[in-house]
Amino acid sequence: MAKAAQSHNVVASRYVGALIDLAEDSKKLKDVEKDFSDLVGMASSSADFRQLIHSPVTSESQQFDAIDAIAKKARFTTITTNFLKVLVQNRRLNILESVLSVFQREVSKRRGEIIVTVETAQDLTAAQMKSLQDTLKKETGADVVLNTKVEPSILGGMIVTVGSHMIDDSVARKLERLKTSMTGGANENTNLKEVS
């Protein structure tokens, strides 16, 4: 599975590099970024959209028609629409999620920004995001782009990932550590007797 994801990222990088170069040459990178932001939203919120890009039984013409309709409704730029159609023609629509991720990373890299993934139990407010961004900018010395995810299972706190470094300050992790320390200390407490 990890090998497939790595392979998708390599292929996605080639497509993304060509797309960004074309968008920059056409002075349309901001517009393409907005389109890609919309696509990220679709990929995370629509099961039908994920089915469209991943289903091996969806024909090329079905994907082509669906992408065309989505692009028109979302008012994507010609560059984005043509790019998506190229993915369909090359039977590469299944790597779209990798493309979206690589695109964000590459655009940020070219701007000297760092992408930080932040997982929280519930959505951060605009003020919380600004405060976190400012703090991370001071720590890293670079402009920071926050990629936020809501993960209710962490209960509270947050998990912050910068590159290959992860800081897990979630309530779930703290409870796990507490449970481990209590279980580890249980043997030492076997001689204790209840005081009445």
Image (spheres, rainbow, N blue to C red):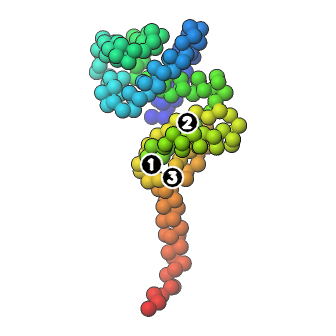
Q: Looking at the picture, does residue 44 appear above or below residue 170?
A: above
Total count of labels:
3
Q: Which mark is residue 167?
A: none
Q: Which residue is mark 2?
A: 146
Residue 141 position within the rendered picture, expressed as x and y whole percent measured from the top left: 71, 37
Question: What's under tag 2, amino acid-wise?
Answer: Leu
Question: What's under tag 3, amino acid-wise?
Answer: Gly
Q: Earlier in the sequence, mark 3 or mark 1?
A: 1
CB within 8 Å, label 1 to label 2: no
Q: Residue at x 48, y 46 (%)?
A: 120
Q: Which residue is mark 3?
A: 157
Q: Which residue is mark 1?
A: 121
**Disc 2 crowd, CA 10 A, few/some/many (<14, 14-19, 20+):** some
Quick one: 33 or 106, which is closer to the camera?
A: 33
Q: Earlier in the sequence, mark 2 or mark 3?
A: 2
Q: Is residue 177 something one can see in this rendering? A: yes
Quadrant, the N terminus = top left
